[in-house]
Amino acid sequence: MALPVLKFAKPTAGVSTSGGVTFAVYAPFGTDPVLSRYPGTTPLKIKDHPLVKALVEVSKRSVHVSALVDLHGDDTWLVEIPAGKPTAMRITSRWKQAMDAPNNLSGFLRHTRAQWPGTALVLAIEGHGAGYLPDLDTSQLTAEGLTGGGTLQWQITDDGATPLLPMGSPLLPKGSPLLPKGSPLLPVNHYPLSTAGLAKALKDGVAGGERIAVIHFNNCFNMSVELLHTVAPYAEFAAGYMNYNFFTAGESYPAAFDKLKQAGSASTQQMALWFAEGNRDLLAVKQHHPTTGGVARLSDLPLVATRVDALAKALVSALRNATTAARPGVVLKVRSALQRAQQYDTGSTFRLDVPDELTDLASLAEAFKTFDVNKIAVQKAANELATALAGFKVYGAKDTPWVDPSQLWDFTGRALAMNILCPDPALRGLWDWRSPYYLQLEPTPVQPQAIAFLKNTAWVEFIIEYHKEVPFRGLLPASIPTYPIFNRKYST
């Protein structure tokens, strides 16, 4: 049986991937009963889960399959299917794994490589996504640490959690929420792998400088500049979704791999496109599931980071060099540009606008192309960033989402590419729960190291400068957004 192959744009010296393709799927559904039992509400046996059924169909397309699937109230299951031999499927309990631990994913990848060496590895990350997630040593978040040995108290107000010193004064330099000893607000609902943890898992999971052919982030918000930049050294292409995606349990995978089988061979870029386009096509037929998806050549991300840095520095200069009288007007112009940019949903509603805190980077560059303070530097940087982001977007739908038919999600604009976390864009003094970690670039016991994108660009410096006069009111609820599912019952 001839196996289809994937061709790398830049093959790794000494690494052969001519032996076919292995599709590795990492599915941390164990903290979510809805995803575990989809499409119904009754607990499923692992072999009956629709994701596993889809993977059986993938194996029929002459592709090896290795999946680690963690189910709510059940074991973590290793599912292995040799290419073209669906009846040889092996399902083995791995007891209960910590799916948010980097060494769990890296161990799974090493096992998969050992099973089918010499194949091109394609990885799908299922479950929940949130874009940037801090890498935290939660063992440091003790009562002693969070209260500074009893010198600090945390009070819950109508605006969120506000850290107060004993005399009631917020410990917040220059308006940025750099909170002592981290923050007690951490999501406990389906927390995925951190951004840095995912990169470490990929680095440790593939040896000898080998790269993953394609990563498909089949979840929400993970077409994210912070995430893509961090994983860039370990894979050639990535496909992902800027806003919410809809959970479909791998239903589009067989069609994508059928295209590979029919072609016999394809580039890694083409495989990434097939993932994004397959997701688009499946959701479009149903209607009322609007999404926007993209594909990233990950070697392009260092240039994107350089261009973000240039724009951030130009904006910092515009703000700092303004006179005391002129500064409020400059701040308002920055806020206006942020409000014109495409927002992705992070709030408590499905309305896509400020104060949502994930901003599309390409539309943000577009909004600053006409900025008239520090005009030459800002406009040059905005134009160069827009150029660097051209071509990342694959598709964008326009429709009313079934999760809230009162809204219209319109992703048809040309200038879309990927999201970036922009806390408190409306200057309300209410910050995303990740902000205390996002803005903390120096090592702390809670967060030993910030990701390179934040350390090596002026984006954090811009966020702090923009908020200099804004009183801190609180942190928004700590939660990972709910993953909307594919609604089989929705009727037009």
Image (spheres, rainbow, N blue to C red):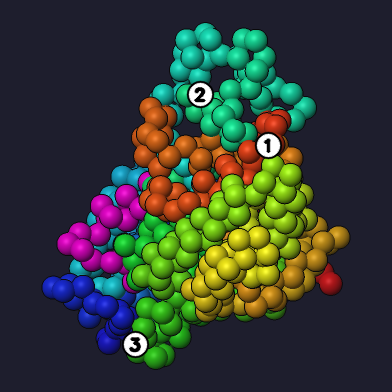
Q: Residue furthest left?
A: 14
Q: Is residue 478 above or below residue 36?
A: above
Residue nearest the observer in this picture, 17 or 353: 353
Whether residue 124 sits left or right of residue 206 in the image: it is right
Span of residues in magenta: 197-219
Q: Which residue is mark 2?
A: 180
The amino acid sitting under disc 1 is Glu
Q: Which residue is mark 1?
A: 469
Which image quarter is the N terminus in? bottom left
Q: CA distance from mark 1 to mark 2?
A: 20 Å
Q: CA distance from mark 1 to mark 3?
A: 57 Å
Q: Which residue is mark 3?
A: 265
Badges 1 and 3: C-beta atoms under 8 Å apart? no
The amino acid sitting under disc 2 is Pro
**Image point (74%, 23%), residue name:** 157
Residue 365 visible (yes or no):
no
